[in-house]
Image (cartoon, rainbow, N blue to C red):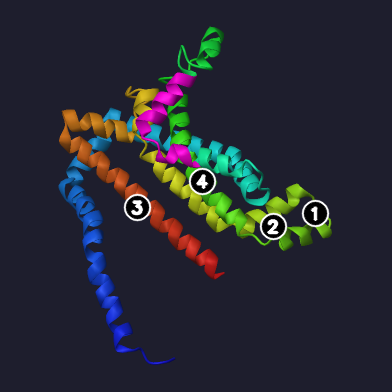
């Protein structure tokens, strides 16, 4: 291995020093949050019925939204990556748009679609279908805001797949469904899992669209972010405890997934 030049030896230190302000900006608020949330406050929060309901509802709705996103978003991602059309740019923009819109706008858009006087709600309400201010609305708000993250990550993964691998499978007698599950998905699994984790983390922290479209009703639509918002006005210690739980769960999940994906890449 060639010897490093003085410039190359100095570069890591210079990069570390230059990176320190931004890393501190990200890390210090999280450390301050964890420092202020004592174990006693966390234990007390877990004993509160509203806090347990918020945690359970968050986990349940994010898992449902993740499953529906996986089923409905994967075909979209595969289509965009493997079968580009003239509408590709428009579809790409449509998929990316919810991710850059203010969450409040997303919630209002859903309400104008599925509300009592909404575009579709006006026809659903006479049939007895009530979506706003229910757990279904929570799932839909999470999907609308976080789902595009999975579609984008999955599309990038499918686009990196060598078409010759699928062609070879087809020549061996595999149909499109078998080729997709036996060739495409296993090879692109790292990108798919990474997209799912990003989607789940974003859905877990969703606030703006949820409070407008689903409301903030304890035990029915109040997720952890909404409980934190309410706790900030009523009991700051409870809000800190729930925030610490949310940060801890998200951090551990992301870390475990990154470790698993690294092992998969090495294999």
- Of residue 50 and residue 197, the one placed in the foreground of this image is 197
Q: Which residues are magenta?
A: 96-113
Quarter of the image where one finds residue 115: top left
Q: Position of residue 237 (x, y in %)?
A: 17, 38
Quarter of the image where one finds residue 230: top left
Numbered disc 3: secondary structure: helix
Mark whose residue sits in front, 3 or 4: 4
Q: Earlier in the sequence, mark 3 or mark 1?
A: 1
Report the disc number at residue 150: 4
Mark whose residue sits in front, 1 or 4: 4
Q: Which residue is mark 1?
A: 174
What secondary structure is the stretch in magenta mostly built from? helix
Mark 3–mark 4 Cα distance, whole angstroms, equals: 19 Å
**10 Å neighbourhood of mark 1: few (<14), some, or many (≥20)?**
some
Q: Position of residue 221 (x, y in %)?
A: 37, 25
Q: Does residue 165 appear left or right of residue 219 in this picture?
A: right
Pointers 1 and 2 in contact (C-beta within 8 Å): yes
Q: Earlier in the sequence, mark 1 or mark 4?
A: 4
Pointers 2 and 3 in contact (C-beta within 8 Å): no
Numbered disc 4: secondary structure: helix
Pointers 4 and 2 in contact (C-beta within 8 Å): no
Q: Which residue is mark 3?
A: 251
Numbered disc 1: secondary structure: loop
Numbered disc 2: secondary structure: helix
Q: Which residue is mark 2?
A: 183
Mark whose residue sits in front, 3 or 1: 1
- Of residue 250 and residue 42, the one placed in the foreground of this image is 250
């Amino acid at each position: 291995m060639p010897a490093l030049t003085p410039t190359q030896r100095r570069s890591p230190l210079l990069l570390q020093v230059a990176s320190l302000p931004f890393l501190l900006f990200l890390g210090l608020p999280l450390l301050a949050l964890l420092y202020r949330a004592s174990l006693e406050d966390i234990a007390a929060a877990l004993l509160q019925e509203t806090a347990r309901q918020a945690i359970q509802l968050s986990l349940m709705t994010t898992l449902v939204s993740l499953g529906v996103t996986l089923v409905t978003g994967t075909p979209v991602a595969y289509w965009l990556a493997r079968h580009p059309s003239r509408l590709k740019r428009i579809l790409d923009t449509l998929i990316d748009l919810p991710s850059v819109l203010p969450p409040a706008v997303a919630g209002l858009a859903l309400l104008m679609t599925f509300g009592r006087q909404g575009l579709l709600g006006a026809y659903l309400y006479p049939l007895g279908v009530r979506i706003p201010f229910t757990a279904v609305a929570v799932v839909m708000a999470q999907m609308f805001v976080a789902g595009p993250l999975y579609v984008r990550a999955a599309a990038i993964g499918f686009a990196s797949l060598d078409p010759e691998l699928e062609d070879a499978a087809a020549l061996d007698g595999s149909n499109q469904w078998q080729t997709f599950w036996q060739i495409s998905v296993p090879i692109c699994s790292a990108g798919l899992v990474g997209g799912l984790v990003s989607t789940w983390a974003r859905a877990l922290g969703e606030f703006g669209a949820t409070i407008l479209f689903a409301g903030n009703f304890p035990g029915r639509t109040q997720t952890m972010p909404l409980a934190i918002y309410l706790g900030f006005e009523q009991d700051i210690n409870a809000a800190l405890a729930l925030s610490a739980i949310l940060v801890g769960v998200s951090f551990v999940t992301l870390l475990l997934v990154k470790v698993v994906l690294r092992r998969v890449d090495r294999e």
